[in-house]
Image (cartoon, rainbow, N blue to C red):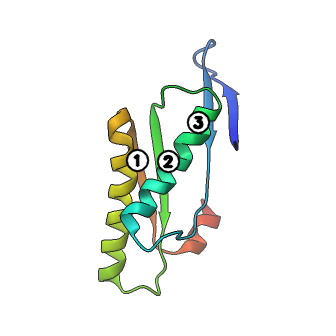
Amino acid sequence: MDCSVQPSKKYKDLFIVSTTDFFYPLVEDPYLQGRIACANVLSDMYSMGVVSVDTMLMILASSRDMPPGPRHIVTQHMIRGFSGMTQPIQHDVLCDLCVNPASLLQI
Protein backbone atom coordinates (compact mmCIF):
# COMPACT_ATOMS: atom_id res chain seq x y z
CA MET A 1 0.00 0.00 0.00
CA ASP A 2 1.79 3.11 -1.24
CA CYS A 3 -0.93 5.69 -1.77
CA SER A 4 -1.23 9.31 -0.82
CA VAL A 5 -4.53 10.81 0.35
CA GLN A 6 -5.20 14.53 -0.02
CA PRO A 7 -8.41 16.46 0.70
CA SER A 8 -9.97 18.00 -2.39
CA LYS A 9 -9.73 21.78 -2.43
CA LYS A 10 -12.78 22.09 -4.66
CA TYR A 11 -15.06 19.49 -3.05
CA LYS A 12 -14.84 19.62 0.74
CA ASP A 13 -16.28 16.13 1.36
CA LEU A 14 -14.01 14.33 -1.13
CA PHE A 15 -10.40 13.17 -1.11
CA ILE A 16 -7.88 12.58 -3.89
CA VAL A 17 -6.12 9.22 -3.59
CA SER A 18 -3.08 8.67 -5.78
CA THR A 19 -0.41 6.04 -6.25
CA THR A 20 2.67 5.79 -8.45
CA ASP A 21 4.52 2.58 -9.19
CA PHE A 22 7.57 1.80 -11.32
CA PHE A 23 8.01 -1.58 -12.99
CA TYR A 24 10.79 -3.24 -14.89
CA PRO A 25 9.65 -6.02 -17.22
CA LEU A 26 8.48 -8.93 -15.08
CA VAL A 27 7.37 -11.14 -17.98
CA GLU A 28 8.25 -11.40 -21.66
CA ASP A 29 4.70 -10.70 -22.87
CA PRO A 30 4.16 -6.91 -23.08
CA TYR A 31 0.35 -7.27 -23.03
CA LEU A 32 0.54 -9.29 -19.82
CA GLN A 33 3.04 -6.79 -18.38
CA GLY A 34 0.48 -4.01 -18.94
CA ARG A 35 -2.18 -6.06 -17.17
CA ILE A 36 0.14 -6.74 -14.23
CA ALA A 37 0.95 -3.04 -13.89
CA CYS A 38 -2.73 -2.08 -13.93
CA ALA A 39 -3.64 -4.79 -11.41
CA ASN A 40 -0.97 -3.46 -9.06
CA VAL A 41 -2.30 0.10 -9.29
CA LEU A 42 -5.86 -1.04 -8.69
CA SER A 43 -4.85 -3.22 -5.74
CA ASP A 44 -3.20 -0.17 -4.13
CA MET A 45 -6.44 1.77 -4.50
CA TYR A 46 -8.66 -1.05 -3.29
CA SER A 47 -6.42 -1.56 -0.25
CA MET A 48 -7.20 2.05 0.72
CA GLY A 49 -10.94 1.38 0.50
CA VAL A 50 -11.37 3.18 -2.83
CA VAL A 51 -14.23 1.53 -4.72
CA SER A 52 -14.41 3.88 -7.71
CA VAL A 53 -11.46 5.22 -9.69
CA ASP A 54 -12.19 8.18 -11.97
CA THR A 55 -8.99 8.27 -14.03
CA MET A 56 -5.72 6.37 -14.32
CA LEU A 57 -2.59 7.79 -15.94
CA MET A 58 -0.09 5.34 -17.39
CA ILE A 59 3.41 6.75 -17.84
CA LEU A 60 5.34 4.38 -20.07
CA ALA A 61 9.07 4.76 -20.72
CA SER A 62 10.87 2.93 -23.47
CA SER A 63 14.54 2.79 -24.38
CA ARG A 64 15.96 4.45 -27.48
CA ASP A 65 18.22 1.42 -27.81
CA MET A 66 15.23 -0.60 -28.99
CA PRO A 67 14.56 -0.26 -32.74
CA PRO A 68 11.53 1.96 -33.48
CA GLY A 69 9.38 -0.79 -35.04
CA PRO A 70 9.61 -3.30 -32.19
CA ARG A 71 9.43 -0.47 -29.62
CA HIS A 72 6.14 0.69 -31.13
CA ILE A 73 4.72 -2.84 -31.08
CA VAL A 74 5.80 -3.50 -27.48
CA THR A 75 4.49 -0.19 -26.14
CA GLN A 76 1.17 -0.61 -27.94
CA HIS A 77 0.73 -4.07 -26.44
CA MET A 78 1.55 -2.77 -22.95
CA ILE A 79 -0.97 0.06 -23.35
CA ARG A 80 -3.61 -2.39 -24.59
CA GLY A 81 -2.95 -4.72 -21.64
CA PHE A 82 -3.19 -1.88 -19.12
CA SER A 83 -6.31 -0.41 -20.72
CA GLY A 84 -7.92 -3.81 -21.15
CA MET A 85 -7.61 -4.46 -17.43
CA THR A 86 -9.59 -1.28 -16.68
CA GLN A 87 -12.48 -1.87 -19.10
CA PRO A 88 -14.44 -4.36 -16.97
CA ILE A 89 -14.47 -1.82 -14.17
CA GLN A 90 -15.07 1.15 -16.52
CA HIS A 91 -12.11 3.41 -15.72
CA ASP A 92 -10.68 5.98 -18.11
CA VAL A 93 -6.99 5.57 -18.88
CA LEU A 94 -4.67 8.30 -20.07
CA CYS A 95 -1.24 7.34 -21.37
CA ASP A 96 1.91 9.44 -21.49
CA LEU A 97 4.74 7.80 -23.43
CA CYS A 98 8.36 8.72 -22.71
CA VAL A 99 10.84 7.44 -25.28
CA ASN A 100 13.89 8.07 -23.10
CA PRO A 101 13.77 6.69 -19.54
CA ALA A 102 15.92 9.63 -18.35
CA SER A 103 13.03 11.94 -19.28
CA LEU A 104 11.11 10.55 -16.30
CA LEU A 105 13.47 12.58 -14.13
CA GLN A 106 12.32 15.78 -15.85
CA ILE A 107 8.60 15.31 -15.26
The disc placed on residue 45 is 3
Quadrant, the C terminus: bottom right
Which structural element holds mark 2? helix
Who comes first in sequence, dot 3 or dot 2? 2
The disc placed on residue 39 is 2
The kind of residue tagged 3 is: Met
Q: Quadrant of residue 1?
A: top right
Q: Residue at x 47, y 87 (%)?
A: 65
- Crowdedness of circle 3 by 10 Å Cα count: few (<14), some, many (20+)? many
Residue 53 in the image: above or below residue 76: above
Q: Nearer the viewer, residue 10 or 19?
A: 19
- In the picture provided, is 80 more to the left or to the right than 106? left
Residue 82 in the image: above or below residue 102: above
Which structural element holds mark 3? helix
Q: Which residue sits furthest top?
A: 13
Nearer the camera: disc 3 or disc 1: 3
> Horizontal and vertical percent for residue 2?
70, 44
Nearer the camera: disc 1 or disc 2: 2
The kind of residue tagged 2 is: Ala
> Horizontal and vertical percent for residue 78?
39, 62
- Crowdedness of circle 2 by 10 Å Cα count: few (<14), some, many (20+)? some
Q: Does the residue at mark 3 contact the one at mark 2 (Cβ under 8 Å)?
A: no
The kind of residue tagged 1 is: Leu
Mark 1–mark 2 Cα distance, whole angstroms, equals 16 Å
Residue 107 in the image: above or below residue 28: above
Q: Residue at x 32, y 81 (%)?
A: 70
Mark 3–mark 1 Cα distance, whole angstroms, equals 17 Å
> Horizontal and vertical percent for residue 71?
37, 77
Who comes first in sequence, dot 3 or dot 1? 3
- The residue wearing badge 1 is 94
Nearer the camera: disc 3 or disc 2: 2
